[in-house]
Image (tube, grey):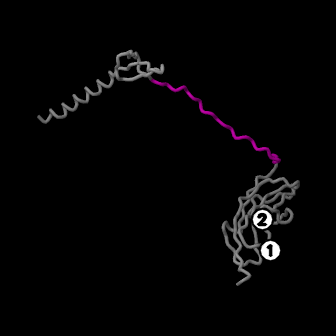
Amino acid sequence: MAYDAPMKYGLLLLLLVASITEAQIYRTVDNDGNIVYTDVPSDNAEEIVIDITPSYTPPEITPLIVEEPLLETSQSVDDPLYKLSITSPAQNQSFQNPETIIVTVGVSPELSELRSDKLLFKLDGKPIGKPQVSSSITLVELERGSHILVVSAVDKSGNVLKRSKSVLFHVHRRSVAQ
């Protein structure tokens, strides 16, 4: 008796699957002239016989390889590949009532004297002085607020060879009322 329950459910499942696979498809035309396919028979329905099971085989797609466009630069093969990083001030550093802020930059390899390469410092998008060989500069009497600093290695014509990541720093000043 213990085997009767699973056997009944197994037989019921087999009948259910068999009835689903043998579903009939009917085609009718409604009053507006539209063709309607259904599994419900009607008086004016025509039975459709499908010889094979509908399937879809997707076309073979070859992967598309997109090449990065070459950026047009004035850099020649002889241009050194500089690495620039602003070492001071640090990202998001805050200064309380500073008289001066010293900016220092790490440059690797050293600037080429033969090519007359120099560093151009920019504060809030505006150049600070002329391009220079020194890897540090002193900022004097900055207004309060947030400032963005960037340094670029430039050749003797002023073409940018390499640009550092920007550094955001903040200057806090006491109010005149205090």
Residue 162, located in which quarter of the rendered image?
Answer: bottom right
Q: Is residue 56 above or below residue 142?
A: above
Position of residue 113 in the picture relative to residue 100 (left or right): right
| Residue drawn at 40 percent across, 17 percent down | 50
Where residue 88 sits, quadrant-wise, is: bottom right
* Residue at image coords 11%, 34%: 1
Q: Is residue 65 magenta?
A: yes
- Does 148 sit above or below residue 69? below
The quadrant of the image that shows the C terminus is bottom right
Residue occupying the point 36% across, 23% down: 39
Mark 2 lies on residue: 123
Mark carried by residue 140: 1
Q: Residues within 10 Å of mark 2 (few under 14, many from 20)?
A: some
Label 1 residue SS: strand
In the displayed structure, 111 sits above or below 33; it is below
Magenta region: which residues? 55-77
| Three-letter amino acid code at the position of disc 2 | Leu
Q: Quadrant of residue 40?
A: top left
Dot 2 or dot 1, earlier in sequence:
2
Name the magenta segment's main secondary structure. Answer: loop
Label 2 secondary element: strand
104 inside magenta stretch: no
Depth check, front residue: 41 or 148 = 41
At which x and y percent is residue 159?
84, 53
Image x and y of residue 169, in percent: 70, 68
Spot occupied by residue 108 in the image (x, y as percentages of width and height): 75, 59
Q: Picture coordinates of residue 12 (x, y %)?
A: 23, 29
Question: The disc labelled 1 sits on which kind of residue?
Answer: Val
41, 178: nearer the viewer:
41
